[in-house]
Image (cartoon, helix red, strand yellow):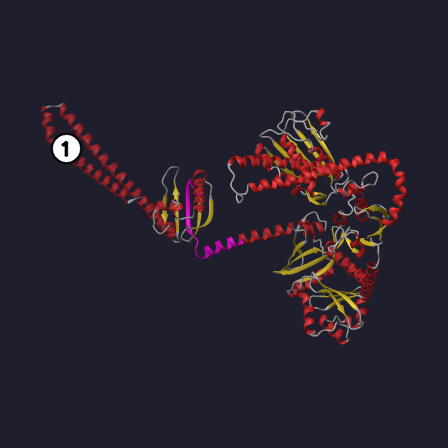
């Protein structure tokens, strides 16, 4: 019972005693005054006096009963007060003990009696920061890291809502290690925060360390379980305590536990005993041993290391490595046997400059003793021994030469030298660094080769002297078509100087140089085919040449064994004059046929003459127009510049027409020759596109150029290919309207190169499409295109000259697509595939 309760009980007893005393006094007074009053009343009033006496008697009895009741209750209250006092003392003792226990360690306790009620917080509030405050304890974000504070707040909310207990170890912002625990106790949510210092902190640290170690062990076991290498652990008695999945598969066990429980061993007894001996000695055992893995005999690389009282082991399958090593040894031995059969001397030195291999030719070349070579002498020792035997080239400074030779060990490039030995031999030495370090020497005895070269040079000089004395003109052309040698009679016969023949001109260049005296294209093509062609069978050629100066030469081409061709020219002018006089009588019989031939020749000559005669003045006109536009000549007014531009434009168009006519005439006369080269497809397309940029801008058109990836190049006349693409683009521009798009594309397909030009113009009717390649015919079909009708004719002629073809796909209102198809291997391949075995024009 509390002090206040005890005071209230004492005050109640005092008041009760006072009321009882008053009542007793009042009853006594009534009893003392009753006799006289009763006597008087009896005498005077009779029944009234009797009633008063009865009332007084009742009050006296009531007072006595009240006093007796008070005494009885007071005794009961005193007993209860004593019992409550004893209970209060016991509760105080428990409270003192609880406060003693609560203060025995640094902690904070918060208790919630029910939802919505404020918590009772007791304990060392300094755990929640340096400013003790009961409310600050529950503001976890003020003294805990944000992530930890959110976790604790959620745990406290679950504790208060559903009685979910939790426990964790945290670190406050001031570095304290705290244990926070929450649990429901008798319907009350209790949160305890205590400082885990000293032994408790060490225990928490060890628990964290244990958890981390267990996690690492589990991760390591998971890693070992995922490896394909069998791994195992043994206890102190040498029995298996843990194996990975690869081990279970190797011993064909159901699982890892089955392999451990049954003690199935993968390693055979000798290897296990060797591992146990090493384990007893405290060292790691490393070795190779055979084992049966999944029913197959394999060779394993085993590592067994002591681990505490037991050991840990791992095995790797090296059967393939052993097999490859054996195969490498066999291959090395086979190479050694092969190198022993070579006439080239081979010596291999390792990174330490020690001899590791030599063949029989090396030993015989230097006359070295086999037993001495088996001792693996160094490179320097071998050089010193060879110098002592006078088998090395004579050197003014042998030490410097030797150091230069040995510096190849630090080089990455192969060095080739020629050694002239004192005994008259000539050696070709190849010094090649090895990728793994060291050098390889290759020695070839080229004494006979040098002797043959000198003999060959002597023969060439004799041959040249012989040719120089001949009266006939002699020229030898190599398989590449270039002039290899000639005699003075040849140069004199064709009026050629040393400067023109000194740079080994090609047969085509020789034909151009000889054109002033003889310009028969057919004859020169035949000579070119005999010299630089690729016929199935090389045969000789004989032809008579009638030159412009009236002289007559008999030309003969004879193939030589080395692929070259010998040309001889004999002046037969005198004999031909006699023969001509004899045959003039029969000339009249063929006058008519000759007239027709002359007429055709006259036509071709006229076309050539007119074209050349017109092109020269046009070139001059264009040049002077360009000069007039130069400010250095003098200023022109706007009208003069406009007229000059018209003249320039018309002259250029006329020059292009003349060039086209000349090209067609050359093709008709079989005089067109292609300058073959490797033509880059993408670069050629860009060059043709650049040539029409001005017309594209003027016509407000868009040109898209696309080439398939990896197009590369093909053999053709690059200039003619660009001219083909330029004419196709010009034709597409002429038939396109502003805003249209023109596509230039190239693909490689089925051994052919396809160039395609596509426009969005008005298209070509079917009737016109059949005559689209006719010369001097143009079809405007409502477009603004104007021309003389030679562009597509030249395109087809040039493409067919390359052994290709042209395809036109068009329809009214759907645009036009022109495709030029070239053989991807160039004109030479096309020549090989012609049905009659003839080369196409220009070859």
Q: Is residue 799 visible?
A: no
Seen from the viewer's position, the closer of residues 273 and 140 is 140
- In the displayed structure, 817 sits above or below 228; it is above
Q: Quarter of the image holding residue 65?
A: top left
Q: Is residue 192 magenta?
A: yes
- Is residue 541 positioned above or below 453 on the image? above
Quadrant in the picture for residue 425: bottom right
114 left or right, relative to 289: left
Badge 1 crowding class, 10 Å Cα cut-off, few under 14, some 14 to 19, many 20 or more, is: some
- Quadrant, the C terminus: top right
SS at mark 1 in the image: helix
Screen quadrant of the N terminus: top left
Which of 775 and 277 lies nearest the eye of the viewer? 775
Across and down, in percent, residue 277 comes to 68, 64
* x, y percent for residue 116: 38, 37
Percent coordinates x, y for residue 289 in the rendering: 73, 59
Report x, y in % for residue 821.
72, 37
Q: Read off the magenta span.
A: 183-210
Q: Is residue 170 visible?
A: yes
Of residues 691 and 713, which is closer to you in this image? 691
Which residue is outermost to the bottom? 388
Within the magenta stretch, is there residue 504?
Answer: no
Residue nearer the viewer, 197 or 406: 406
**Where 463 sits versus 32, above or below?**
below
- Provide the residue designation for mark 1: 30
């Amino acid at each position: 019972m509390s002090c206040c309760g005890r005071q209230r009980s004492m005050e109640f007893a005092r008041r009760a005693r006072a009321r009882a005393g008053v009542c007793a006094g009042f009853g006594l007074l009534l009893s003392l005054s009753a006799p006289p009053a009763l006597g008087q009343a009896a005498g005077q009033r009779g029944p009234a006096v009797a009633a008063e006496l009865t009332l007084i008697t009742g009050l006296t009895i009531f007072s006595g009963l009240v006093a007796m009741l008070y005494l009885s209750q007071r005794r009961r209250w005193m007993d209860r007060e004593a019992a409550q006092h004893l209970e209060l003392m016991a509760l105080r003792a428990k409270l003192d003990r609880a406060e003693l226990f609560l203060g025995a360690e640094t902690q904070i306790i918060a208790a919630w009696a029910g939802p919505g009620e404020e918590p009772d917080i007791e304990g060392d509030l300094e755990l929640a920061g340096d400013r003790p405050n009961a409310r600050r304890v529950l503001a976890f974000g003020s003294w805990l890291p944000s992530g930890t504070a959110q976790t604790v707040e959620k745990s406290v909310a679950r504790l208060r809502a559903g009685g979910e207990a939790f426990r964790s170890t945290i670190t406050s912002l001031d570095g304290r290690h705290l244990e926070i625990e929450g649990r429901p106790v008798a319907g009350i949510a209790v949160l305890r925060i205590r400082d885990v210092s000293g032994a408790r902190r060490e225990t928490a640290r060890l628990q964290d360390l244990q958890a981390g170690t267990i996690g690492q062990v589990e991760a390591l076991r998971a890693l070992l379980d995922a490896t394909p290498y069998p791994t195992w652990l043994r206890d102190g008695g040498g029995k298996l305590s843990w194996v990975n999945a690869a081990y279970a598969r190797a011993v064909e066990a159901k699982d890892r536990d089955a392999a451990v429980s049954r003690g199935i061993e993968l390693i055979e007894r000798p290897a296990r005993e060797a591992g146990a001996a090493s384990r007893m000695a405290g060292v790691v055992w490393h070795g190779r041993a055979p084992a049966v893995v999944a029913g197959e005999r394999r060779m394993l690389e085993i590592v067994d290391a002591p681990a505490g009282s037991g050991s840990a082991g791992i095995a790797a399958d090296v059967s393939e490595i052993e097999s490859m090593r054996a195969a490498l040894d066999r291959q090395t031995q086979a190479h050694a046997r092969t190198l022993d059969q070579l006439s080239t001397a081979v010596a291999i030195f390792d990174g330490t400059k020690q001899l590791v291999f030599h063949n029989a030719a090396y030993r015989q070349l230097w006359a070295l003793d086999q037993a001495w070579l088996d001792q693996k002498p160094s490179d320097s020792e071998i050089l010193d021994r060879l110098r002592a035997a006078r088998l090395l080239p004579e050197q003014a400074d042998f030490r410097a030469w030797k150091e230069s030779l040995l510096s190849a060990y630090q080089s990455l490039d192969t060095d080739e030298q020629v050694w002239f030995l004192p005994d008259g031999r000539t050696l070709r030495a190849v010094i090649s660094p090895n990728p793994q370090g060291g050098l390889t020497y290759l020695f070839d005895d080229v004494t006979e080769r040098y002797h043959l070269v000198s003999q060959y040079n002597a023969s060439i000089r004799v041959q040249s002297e012989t040719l120089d004395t001949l009266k006939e003109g002699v020229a030898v052309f190599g398989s590449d078509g270039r002039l290899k040698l000639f005699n003075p009679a040849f140069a004199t016969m064709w009026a050629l100087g040393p400067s023109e023949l000194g740079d080994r001109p090609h047969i085509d260049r020789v034909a151009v140089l000889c054109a002033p005296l003889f310009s028969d294209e057919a004859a020169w093509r035949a000579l070119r085919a005999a010299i630089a062609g690729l016929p199935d069978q090389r045969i000789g050629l004989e032809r008579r040449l009638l030159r412009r100066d009236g002289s007559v030469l008999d030309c003969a081409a004879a193939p030589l064994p080395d692929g070259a061709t010998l040309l001889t020219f004999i002046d037969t002018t005198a004999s031909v004059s006699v023969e001509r006089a004899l045959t003039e009588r029969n000339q009249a019989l063929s006058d008519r046929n000759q007239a027709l031939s002359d007429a055709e020749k006259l036509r071709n000559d006229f076309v050539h003459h007119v074209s050349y005669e017109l092109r020269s003045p046009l070139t001059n006109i264009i040049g002077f127009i360009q000069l007039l536009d130069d400010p250095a000549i003098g200023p022109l007014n706007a009208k003069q510049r406009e007229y000059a531009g018209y003249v320039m434009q018309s002259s250029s168009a006329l020059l292009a027409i003349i060039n086209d006519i000349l090209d067609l005439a050359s093709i008709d006369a079989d005089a067109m020759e292609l300058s073959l080269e490797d033509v880059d497809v993408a670069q050629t397309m860009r060059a043709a596109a650049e040539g029409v940029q001005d017309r594209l801008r003027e016509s407000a058109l868009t040109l898209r150029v696309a080439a398939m990836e990896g197009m590369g190049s093909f053999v053709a006349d690059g200039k003619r290919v660009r001219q083909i693409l330029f004419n196709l683009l010009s034709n597409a521009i002429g038939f396109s309207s502003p805003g249209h798009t023109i596509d230039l594309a190239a693909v490689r397909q089925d051994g052919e190169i396809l160039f395609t030009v596509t426009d969005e113009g008005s298209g070509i009717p079917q009737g016109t499409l059949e005559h689209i390649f006719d010369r001097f015919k143009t079809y405007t079909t409502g477009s603004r295109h104007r021309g003389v009708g030679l562009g597509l004719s030249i395109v087809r002629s040039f493409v067919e000259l390359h052994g290709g073809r042209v395809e036109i796909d068009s329809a009214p209102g759907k645009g036009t697509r022109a495709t030029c198809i070239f053989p991807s291997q160039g004109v030479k391949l096309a020549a090989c595939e012609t049905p009659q075995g003839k080369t196409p024009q220009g070859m």
